[in-house]
Amino acid sequence: MRPALRDKIIAVCEKKIAQKGAQVGVSFYAFFANKNDDPELLMEAATWWIQTHQLDHFEKAQKIIDMVQAAK
């Protein structure tokens, strides 16, 4: 996973946790605007989420942070 995507995932998850609490769930779509302006980055996130880790549609934001940080 490219560093820019890793940083974006962590930032979005941390923001969601700050807004809604430690139990908040996220989807990989949370990392992108409604307009798909970077299809390659979206596919990279989808591949990591769906194919590589076989995650559910929604996962706990903290779990995603931990997974992304462990992959560094």
Image: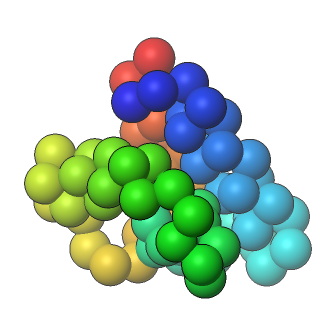
- Name the residue rendered at 55%, 39% in the picture: 5
Q: How is the image coloured?
A: rainbow
Q: Residue at x 66, y 57 (%)?
A: 13
Measured as percent of width and height from the top left, residue 41 is found at 44, 48
Q: In the rendered image, which quarter contains the N terminus? A: top left
The image shows a total of numbered marks equal to 0
Image quadrant assignment for residue 33: bottom right
Please state if 39 lies on the left or on the right of 54 as rendered.
right
* Image-based side of 39 in relation to 13, left or right: left
For this orientation, the residue located farthest to the top is 72
Q: Is residue 47 above or below residue 17?
A: above
The quadrant in which the C terminus is found is top left
| Nearer the observer, 38 or 44 | 38
Side of 34 relative to 64 (left or right): right
Q: Quadrant of residue 46?
A: bottom left
Which of the two residues, 53 or 42, is positioned nearer the viewer here?
42
Considering only vertical position in the picture, is 66 above or below 48?
above
Going by the image, does 29 lie left or right of 1? Answer: right
Q: Out of 35 and 32, give the one closest to the viewer.
A: 35
The structure residue drawn at horizontal position 75% and vertical position 65%, both measured from the top left corner, is: 17
| Residue farthest toward the right in the current orientation of the protein | 19
Residue 45 seen in this snapshot: no
Counting from the top left corner in percent of width and height, residue 7 is at 65, 35
Measured as percent of width and height from the top left, residue 24 is found at: 63, 76
Is residue 34 visible in the rendered image? The answer is yes
